[in-house]
Amino acid sequence: MKKYISILLIGLSITSLQAQETNVDDALRLAVDNITGTARYRAMSGAFGAVGGDLSAINQNPAGSIFFNNNFGTVTGSMFNTKNSSRYFGTKTSETDVSLDLNQFGAVFVFKDNSGKTDWKKFSVAVNYENTNNFGNSVFSAGTNPYNSIGNYFVNIAQGIPLDFITNYDYTSLNFYEQQAYLGYDTYIFESQTGNLNDTEYYTNIPLGGNYFQQNQVSTTGYNGKLTGNFSTSYKDKIILGANVNFHFVDIRKSFTVYEENSNPLYDTGSTITEVLFENQLNTLGTGISFNLGAIVKPAEYVRFGVSYESPTWYRITDELTQGVATRSLNNPDNNEFPASYQPTIEYLPYNIQTPSKWTGSVAFIFAKKGLLSADVSTKDYSTTRFKPKNDVVHSVLNNYMNTALGNALEFRLGGEYKIKQLSIRGGYRFDQSPYKVDQNFGDLTGYSGGIGYSFGENKIDLAYNYEHRKMNQAFLSSGMTDPARISRYNNNITLSYSVNF
């Protein structure tokens, strides 16, 4: 058994493995930062490392909570609009997803010591919850593939697995690779060379020759949430220190459907598969923990310098997978299975993901009560991302791949705010470098933002707009046909926050 598992691993495409078979995308969707949180924070593209005074800013630098003058609370809602334009073998398609979310709420409590007996005259305690990522997203790709069939995925995985495992064992007792082989054999996508139970070589029932019309629909919902406990204190109002403890929550629901139709000539004997439908429903649940440390120095009233460290996040993840396959054969109607027949839901063993740590340097210029300019530069080494346990064969291959293919990425954020009496006008820019050394799989991100705020004295209301754009590749399946669709993703988000001093 170990021999054929090794053969399978060699044949798999590391960058786009599907379903329970963990992959690089599983880690990156948790490791790559997103601008979320309050409207003021988002309007300035998150450039708050040396600014503070905002509940979302404590995620960038925990020392920033000291700049609140009073007890303060904020609640935020957002509308997320994501458009994905896809190009697959010359065919263009697009899909748009819109969702609403109550994505942030929290409060900070400020304590002052005016006795003059200590130089530590102020400290703050904050609790804040944010959805660090809204996974609402839909991608539709379609086109005619001149080379590879969907059926190759099942045939490639089956090679090396004894026919006995595919035919004489219960589906739920099989490992992931055997389950994929079972699905393909049970729906006549491939056949054994000899029919012997010890046979490990198979041939496809899908006609060769290319020109396969294919569609891929991927729909995702869910979130990655973070609950933060924060503490910050000030020494002589010149040096500010802060720390966070973060608890993370993951709930992702993903469905992906691959369809293929071909009009190639029928085989003279046996089955000729003319249509294939492969449906998957994957639920991912998990929890994690991390911490932040930060400091801000005020050498003068008009300038601040900040530095912060964000630890790795240590996640524990569990996947639940339901799959179904349907095929149609014109010359063998008895083999037709439409719609797909779903197999039992499988809950796989938990695994761990460790995301990379992050360092941020910041500077802010404060123009009295007129406004501010701020900039943050962050560095994160994605090659340190890890799946655990490390001695797992698949995890070891993935970790080695990430160590080679991923690299150190820089992120730059620039933000500004100008005040006209009770009105604030804001803008920002963000550039986030790709985690990959060669960014074809997952490109750089460019983003712009703007917003306004109005103070009613004890209460404030803020509105922000964000635009982001990134390009990436998305393969329909992993083994056998890894021809990717090229995706251009556009995010247009509107955020509204209400804040109160108390």
Image (cartoon, rainbow, N blue to C red):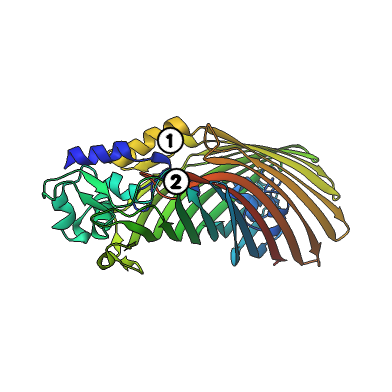
Specify whether 307 is left or right of 327: right
Mark 1 residue type = Met
- Say which residue appears at 72% left-offset and 44% top-offset: 429
Q: Residue 326, image x and y in percent? A: 33, 63
In the picture, the quarter occupied by the C terminus is: bottom right
Q: Secondary structure at mark 2?
A: helix
The foreground one among 482 and 346 is 482
Can see residue 215?
yes
- Give the residue at mark 2: 27
Q: Which of 108/248 is in front?
A: 248
Q: Secondary structure at mark 1?
A: helix
Amino acid type shown at disc 2: Ala
Label 1–label 2 contact, CB within 8 A: yes
Q: Is residue 408 left or right of residue 45?
A: left
Observer-nearest of 267 and 3: 267
Residue at point 74%, 42% (across, down): 374
